[in-house]
Amino acid sequence: MADTVPSNDTATASERPKKQLILNAFAMNTPGHLSPGLWNHPRNRTDEYKKLSFWTDLAQLLDKAGFHALFIADTLGAYDVYKGPANFEPSLTAGAQFPVNDPLFLVPSMAAVTKNLAFGVTASTTYDQPYALARRFSTVDHLSGGRVGWNIVTSYLDSAARNHGLNAQIEHDKRYEMADEYMDVVYKLWEGSWRDDAVVADRKSGTYAVTGRVRDINHKGTYFSVPGPHICEPSPQRTPLLFQAGSSGAGRNFGAKHAEAIFVGGQTPEKVRATVDDIRKLAKDEYGRDPYHIKVIAGVSVIVAETDEAAEKKQQDLLKYGDREGGLALFGGWTGIDLSKYSDDEDFKLSSVPSVRGIVNRWAETVPGSDNLKWTKARIVDYLLLGGMMPKIIGSPKKVADELERWADLGDLDGFNLSHITNPGSFEDIIEFVIPELRERGLFGTRAQDGATAREVFLGQKGLLPDHYGSRFHWGADEEVPK
């Protein structure tokens, strides 16, 4: 179980208990997630993503090793900016997040073969209706014994907007405004439509649920009109554990209000710390939450072997299988910028496009040996091929553990989303080399009891914590109406 007690700022470093790190595996229901072309590596099996056994094998591996969760990303459109407009061929050829299947359907089968592993699943507030989404997550929360989480996204691809009947994306901040009302709707359905004691399943009287303990929600807002009631009875968690990853001002504000675990990105722990501090401050000042009731998790890509030299050799071998066009397609989707329009020798550290210049300069500051080198398209692709835009940690077990510990301390992080470069491969290496080193340092190993819900694993409690915004909608036993 993750540490739920905030550090005592007045204690000395030697007096503070060591933080137990959250470790999540990061994957996607597609041939190529963050390492385009690596599906073709001899060790890899992600081209079998369509087979249920691929996912149940992975879930059992992670569960046995003590991972907290398997986090499954998703996208609702093809990456079609590169060589575009609307050109999906580079991502299709590389299998770069295209094709991609729905992640939620995987969870019940994986839950059935595991005891403790939680599952974080991505779903959009922009293109899913709240009534239908609430039903799907309640169903899976029941079937998984309460081990599902929802990664709340507002979606960001023009291709997704077009395929959902729009001419263009809804404006960014408006998507978050819609998402905020969306959350009110699902809280009302999950927390406030059924009283805790509504279901009695009394065989003697023949009463399954008691009249008067289930109610309409009668939500009428700016964007949604949902009368209710929720069509599902309360699941073990009622509300699934809530993940979120928005980095904009609107995204951070949304996360500070709603999220229980937030994913952050950045190339150095010092830069990540500024984001973490801002999120925790917003949660406390704007929403009255204990800032450490939000678990903050950074994404990293790890290549580990017995020695630093062996890890670097492994990196070079992996690079041989990367698909460079797929890497440029992913970059186009993530940034909205088509690098095919630029010359091969342009140094993007000096780019006239501020967003590209900012990204590339952050990489240039952190990639060893690149200080005086030009960051051309070729160098950008070299960086992206293994783990995408995530920071890379490459080395021996000691070096990797040192870096994870340094990031956790300097960034005030609670844990990590560990991406895979090959699967199988990356997670097995982490289990063999990194986890024993973390256990030896007292940074990993405490587990919740078998059968704990996702929220119990992350926060030590089955339902929403009392200071969470959504808890105000909860309809407790013996209450006439929700408070």
Image (cartoon, rainbow, N blue to C red):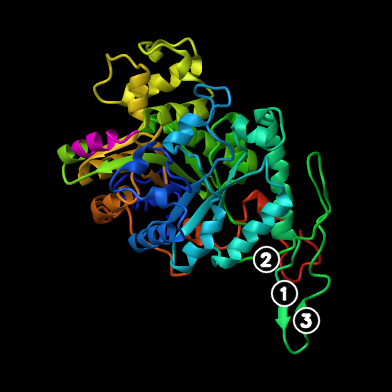
**Would you identify the image quadrant in which residue 464 lies?**
bottom right
Q: Position of residue 420 (x, y in %)?
A: 36, 45
Q: Position of residue 219 (x, y in %)?
A: 81, 50
Q: Mark 3: which secondary structure?
A: strand
Q: Which mark is residue 356?
A: none
Q: What residue is shown with label 3?
A: 207
**Magenta range:** 313-322
Image height of 409 relative to 459, above or below: above
**Would you identify the image quadrant in which residue 449 lies?**
bottom left
Q: Mark 1: which secondary structure?
A: strand
Residues 9 and 141: in front is: 141
Q: What residue is shown with label 1?
A: 199
Task: For the residues labelled 1 and 2, say whether their Cβ atoms are less than 8 Å apart.
Answer: yes
* Residue appearing at x 34%, y 20% in the figure: 378
Residues 40 and 182: in front is: 40
Label 3 is placed on what type of residue? Thr
Residue at the limit of the structure toward the bottom, as seen here: 204
Q: Mark 1 packing: few (<14 Cα in 10 Å), some, or many (20+)?
A: some
Q: What residue is shown with label 2?
A: 234
Task: For the residues labelled 1 and 3, say whether their Cβ atoms are less than 8 Å apart.
Answer: no
